[in-house]
Amino acid sequence: MKLTKITKRNMITYGIVIAFYLIIQIMDATGNLSSHMKGLLVPMTYYSIVAVALNLCVGILGELSLGHAGFMCIGAFSASLFSVAFKESMPGGLRFLIALIIGTAFAALFGFLIGIPVLRLKGDYLAIVTLAFGEIIKNILAAVYFGYDEAGFHISFKSFQLQGEGKMLINGAMGIQGTPNDSNFTIAIIILLLALFIIQNLVNSRDGRAIMSIRDNRIAAESIGINITKYKMLAFTISAAIAGTAGVLFSHNTSTLTATSTYFGYNVSIMILVYVVLGGIGNIRGSVIAASILYILPEMLRGLNTYRMLIYSVVLIVIMLINWAPKAIEFREKHFSSLLRRFAKR
């Protein structure tokens, strides 16, 4: 069986994710996985997903966005609202599936609406506006009160009392309480693989080539008839939708969801951008690896208070060299290609 270079590259990416999942399952079965490490697995995966989503926008489309924490926030709150409202009346699996669709759809909708004015901007201006969008979303959700009672639904920016057997769904700064813990590491890995499948197939399609041509030379792309607005909106909306999916995983991994700077602030957007840059701009596989390593490493080094940040800094430099040095890239591609050829012959 003869594999194309693109197929080989995609298979390597899927293989790395699946191999990591199997290693974790073996460690868990043999009792070599600590409870602290188990708690880091789902967050590590959804940050990998949102890093992949941002790389589509930054690396493939060539537009710098700092608002993906905002799309993650929209996906988290919309999905969590549904799950809390139907917590008692719907089976867990079906409820989470619908919540996942709702969170993804709302993030895609906001990505489309925000993209209409925002994608007319370029460079630093685009980054500033998307950063402002993320902060606006976070602050609105941290101030809103939303609930229902016998008189119907109520929404306000001030606290209010519900009548009868009502229920407060969003309680201002206290956020959403009691979100069912429906996400787990297996579900998160499946969603990560789906996100990789969608993005890698988009990149290697006709639409993906059109998007990259806009990134490389907008004027030349427009001169040969490529619809600039259409393809920029396509990439930005898909990127926002996948970030929203990561938000759904986040919200269903915690019982209390609050719109705070710790979870959805601009520092989170910057952190995700660091994952993308260190993993390699335009390198989808690199985003997954960088996000996984850089998220887990500080947590694993908490016992080494004196040397923790020193080790973390060294790892940042090593990752940068591995992903950006030309000789390292050439060696990596050659090594993995030879392994795949041997596997195909068998």
Image (spheres, helix red, strand yellow):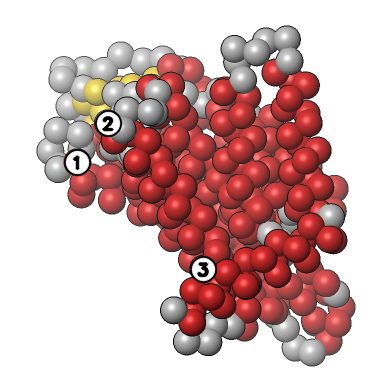
At a point 61% along the width and 20% down the height, the residue shown is 301
Label 3, label 1: how far apart the Cα atoms are? 32 Å
SS for dot 3 = helix
* Residue 111 pos. (x, y %): 57, 54
Q: Nearer the viewer, residue 335 or 63?
A: 335
* Residue tagged 3: 11
Q: Please, what is the three-letter code of the amino acid marked with disc 1?
A: Gly
Residue at 53% across / 87% down in the picture? 2
Numbered disc in front, either 2 or 3: 3
Asked whether 15 or 193 is in front, the reply is 15
**Marks 2/3: CA–CA distance:** 34 Å
Name above or below for residue 43 compared with residue 65: above
Left/right placement of residue 340 relative to residue 190 reads right
What is the number of callouts on the image?
Answer: 3
Q: Which mark is residue 92?
A: 1
Of 148 and 242, which appears nearest the observer?
Answer: 242
**Residue placed most toward the observer, 252 or 123:** 252
Helix, strand or loop for disc 2: loop
User: Could you tell me residue 82's position as x and y percent?
Assistant: 30, 40
Position of residue 89 measured from the top left corner of the image (x, y, whole percent)? 12, 38
CB atoms of marks 2 and 1 within 8 Å: yes
Of callouts 2 and 3, the N-terminal one: 3
| Residue 280 vertical position relative to residue 45 in the rendered view, above or below | below
Crowding around mark 3 (Cα neighbors within 10 Å: few <14, some 14 to 19, many 20+) is few
Tell me: residue 194, above or below residue 210: above
Q: Quadrant of residue 24?
A: top left
The residue that label 2 is drawn on is: 180
For the point 43% across and 37% down, the residue is: 42
Residue 346 seen in this snapshot: yes
Give, as a three-letter code, the residue at label 3.
Answer: Met
